[in-house]
């Protein structure tokens, strides 16, 4: 079985800025810079035949390329017991359209739809208990990374890394195209 999701790769300069925040919040499990990405649609575990059908559905997605900007930081969980630290994105109509379009294409193939609404974010770290979060949040509340251009989406494979963590690898890339 293959554990898959559709996402957007981040440019190297963006990953380096995000990775640079690590020193401001030690004692937590940060993702390595090359693992940082934006998830659009989580697919889950599928067999190779289903993976091929998913990949076929991602060819020629009718969505033009667009700019995307990272803005602010946040967390999932509570301030006392956060579980995930993330970087947010500036509101983006093209991103929302792309995510919904992909969902509509993948639903007939067995894509699991999340119960909660899509919240675009870049997971930075898994937070260990008792790590003081408030200072980090205040320091990076105004995080604003210049926009980058999104020209393609990726089908990612999620697997166990050598050191026991999770490893994300883009196994196929699909160029976005203008409709029509």
Image (tube, rainbow, N blue to C red):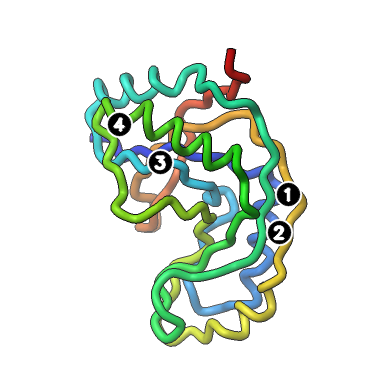
Q: Quadrant of the N terminus?
A: top left
- Mark 1 vs mark 3, CA separation in Å: 24 Å
Density class for disc 2 (Cα within 10 Å; few <14, some 14-19, many ≥20) is few
For the residues labelled 1 and 2, say whether their Cβ atoms are less than 8 Å apart. yes
Q: Which residue, given by chain and number where applicable, does mark 4 sit on?
A: 107
Note whether 129 is above or below 39 in the view shown. below
Q: Position of residue 105 (x, y in %)?
A: 37, 26
- Mark 1 vs mark 2, CA separation in Å: 6 Å
Q: Earlier in the sequence, mark 4 or mark 1?
A: 1
Density class for disc 3 (Cα within 10 Å; few <14, some 14-19, many ≥20) is many
In the current view of this chain or complex, which residue is farthest to the top? 180
| Residue at screen point 69% across, 50% down | 69
**Mark 4 or 1: the one toward you:** 4
| Residue at screen point 42% across, 48% down | 167
Q: Specify the label residue 17 is tagged with.
A: 2
Q: Which residue, given by chain and number where applicable, does mark 3 sit on?
A: 41
Secondary structure at badge 1 equals helix
């Amino acid at each position: 079985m293959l554990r898959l999701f559709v996402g957007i790769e981040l440019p190297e300069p963006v990953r380096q800025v995000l990775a640079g925040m690590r020193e401001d919040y030690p004692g937590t499990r940060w993702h390595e810079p090359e693992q940082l990405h934006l998830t659009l649609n989580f697919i889950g575990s599928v067999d190779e035949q289903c993976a091929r059908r998913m990949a076929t559905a991602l060819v020629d997605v009718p969505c033009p390329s667009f700019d995307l900007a990272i803005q602010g930081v946040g967390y999932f969980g509570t301030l006392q017991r956060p579980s995930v630290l993330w970087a947010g994105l500036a509101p983006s109509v093209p991103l929302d359209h792309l995510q919904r379009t992909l969902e509509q294409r993948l639903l007939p193939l067995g894509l699991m739809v999340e119960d909660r609404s899509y919240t675009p974010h870049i997971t930075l770290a898994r937070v260990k208990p008792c790590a003081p979060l408030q200072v980090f949040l205040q320091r990076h509340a105004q995080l604003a990374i210049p926009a980058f251009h999104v020209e393609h989406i990726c089908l990612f494979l999620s697997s166990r890394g050598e050191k026991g963590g999770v490893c994300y690898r883009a196994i196929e890339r699909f160029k976005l195209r203008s409709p029509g």
